[in-house]
Amino acid sequence: MGNNNTQQNKKQISPILGAILAIWFVANLTSQLVYISIHGSPYDGLAMLMSLGPIYMAILIAEAILWLWVLFYVVYKAYNHILSSDSPEINGTGQMATKST
């Protein structure tokens, strides 16, 4: 039962946020692909956002939040990976695990 404590203490990133980011990214790529195939050149995303009026700032803020989430997620995963590879393995009795050859 001692091993369950370390598994329960791990923080999980919501898979819903990952799905939102993936859908948003694929939707952007798909819309750009369709526009290029019809018109031959990429659309100006900023001009399109500006045409929405005052709501474009909300869209830019939402996009910035998504990119910040990606940044923190990658940093968090890298930090945990570094910590887990540097720390010695401890078994359930509090003793360091040893390998016999």
Image: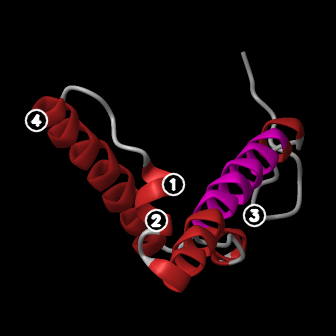
Residue 8, percent from left and from top: 64, 78
Q: Callout 4: helix, strand or loop?
A: helix
List the residue tagged with mark 3.
Answer: 92
Question: In the rendered view, does 82 fall on the left or right side of 42?
Answer: right
Indicate which label's residue lies in the foreground, 3 or 1: 1
Of pointers 3 and 4, the one earlier in the residue sequence: 4
Circle 3 residues within 10 Å: few <14, some 14–19, many ≥20: few
Q: Callout 2: helix, strand or loop?
A: helix
Q: Distance from label 3 to label 2 (Cα)? A: 56 Å
Of pointers 3 and 1, the one earlier in the residue sequence: 1
Residue most extreme to the left = 38
Q: Is residue 46 above or below residue 54?
A: above
Q: Distance from label 1 to label 2 (Cα)? A: 5 Å
Q: Residue at x 31, y 43 (%)?
A: 29
**Viewer-closest of 34 and 99:** 34
Q: Callout 1: helix, strand or loop?
A: helix
List the residue tagged with mark 1.
Answer: 46
Indicate which label's residue lies in the foreground, 3 or 2: 2
Q: Which residues are magenta?
A: 66-82
Residue 78, percent from left and from top: 74, 43
List the residue tagged with mark 4.
Answer: 38
Q: Residue at x 21, y 32 (%)?
A: 36
Residue 56, percent from left and from top: 52, 75
Q: In the image, is residue 45 part of the stretch drawn in magenta?
A: no
Quarter of the picture containing the C terminus is top right
Q: Identify residue type, mark 3.
A: Gly
Q: Callout 3: helix, strand or loop?
A: loop
Q: Identify residue type, mark 2.
A: Leu
List the residue tagged with mark 2.
Answer: 49
Q: Distance from label 3 to label 1 (Cα)? A: 56 Å
